[in-house]
Amino acid sequence: MQSLLEKNDSRTRAVTTPKDLSRVRKIGIAWYRREDYAEVRTAMIDGDVLPESYDDWLRCVSQVVTIEEAMGSAIVKATIAPKSFVDWCLATGQAADMQARTRFVNEAVEDFCRRR
């Protein structure tokens, strides 16, 4: 498997892919940068549902990534930058919450798949 990085708009998608991506289940994951994590939690109306620290979040999400990759899934990491995400929510008429994060990630997966 190899890691790929793509940039589009304010989102970055990093993907670990097997050779034939078309036959693999794609799993989208909201991804945060360490330097943004506290601001992400503050910007989200449900930020309290996220782990308190970046390290705790990273530990949890890394377990999911490891399990999914072991099952052969392609991981699409949709980086959520606080300001860009809030702007995106306002532009799409959504609250900055779990539903919006899910939609954002799903769109990142769709964008990634269209480009392949």
Image (cartoon, grey):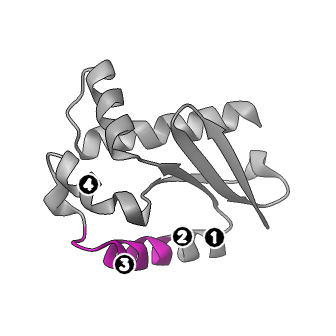
Of residues 48 and 37, the one nearer the viewer is 37
**Which residue has dot 3 on it?**
55
Q: What is the distance, in whole Å, between disc 2 and disc 1 at their CAs?
A: 6 Å
Q: Is residue 110 left or right of residue 36?
A: right
Q: Is residue 24 left or right of residue 1?
A: left
The residue lying toward the viewer, choosing from 36 and 6, is 36
Front residue (pair 94, 9): 9
Q: Position of residue 49 (x, y in %)?
A: 18, 61
Q: Earlier in the sequence, mark 2 or mark 3?
A: 3
Q: Which residue does the numbered mark 1 point to in the structure image? A: 69
Q: Earlier in the sequence, mark 1 or mark 3?
A: 3
Query: SS class of the residue under badge 3?
Result: helix
User: Image quadrant of residue 47?
Assistant: bottom left
Give how far apart the Cα atoms at labels 2 and 4 are. 24 Å
Residue tagged 4: 39
Magenta region, main secondary structure: helix
Which one is in front in this view, the residue at disc 3 or the one at disc 4?
4
| Point 38% across, 76% down: residue | 60
